[in-house]
Amino acid sequence: MNGLVVNLEVVRSRLSRSSNKEDVLAFAESAAAQGEVSVQMSEGVGALLSLIIGAVDARGRLRCSAMSESPEKLRFDLEPGLAERVLPPLTVLGTAVGFTAETSGADAVILSFPEQSSAGHKRHE
């Protein structure tokens, strides 16, 4: 995916120096922007997988719990340092799909999911 973005950026750059390629330049710029969004989403999904894998303890149990004050929040307990690494791409992914991510100290990530109030979505108890 990164190679695609780099190649599209090279095409855009070369075309910007030419005088008759406006349609192609606009396409290349749009493709480069879409490619960057794809890379960010892929990185976010990778961070989500790292979060889940990082929350598995030595006995194979997932260290994740719903927070008592808000069942729409999940706390993942991690090894120190992992929370800081996964937070930036999780934040980007969350913005795109509708959750927030924050750290709680150096060893936990909290994901918050807004309560759905429309008739088509039911809150799971």
Image: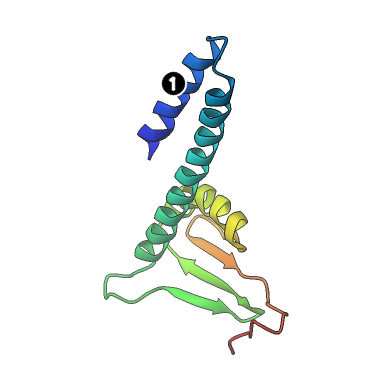
Left or right? Give the position of 47 relative to 34: left
Residue found at x 57% / y 53%: 91
Amino acid carrying label 1: it is Val
> Where in the figure is residue 20, as x and y percent of width and height?
56, 13
Q: Is residue 85 above or below residue 119?
A: above
Left or right? Give the position of 28 relative to 72: left
Left or right? Give the position of 29 relative to 77: right
Q: How many marks?
A: 1
Which quarter of the picture shows residue 103? bottom right
Q: Nearer the viewer, residue 106 or 94?
A: 94
Q: Residues within 10 Å of mark 1 (few under 14, many from 20)?
A: some
Q: Quadrant of the N terminus?
A: top left
Asked which secondary structure carries label 1, the reply is helix
Q: Is residue 23 above or below residue 35?
A: above
> Where in the figure is residue 37, as x and y percent of width and height?
52, 44
Q: Nearer the viewer, residue 101 or 41?
A: 41
Which quarter of the picture shows residue 49? bottom left
Q: Nearer the viewer, residue 56 or 100?
A: 100
Q: Residue furthest bottom?
A: 125
Left or right? Give the position of 108 relative to 57: right
> Where in the figure is residue 66, as x and y percent of width and height?
55, 78
Does residue 102 show up? Answer: no
Does residue 27 show up? Answer: yes
Residue found at x 64% / y 82%: 121
Which quarter of the picture shows residue 61? bottom left
Q: Residue furthest left?
A: 59
> Where in the figure is residue 83, as x and y percent of width and height?
48, 55
What's the image's color scheme? rainbow
Q: Identify residue for label 1.
A: 10
Q: Is residue 100 above or below residue 117?
A: above
Q: Quadrant of the C terminus?
A: bottom right
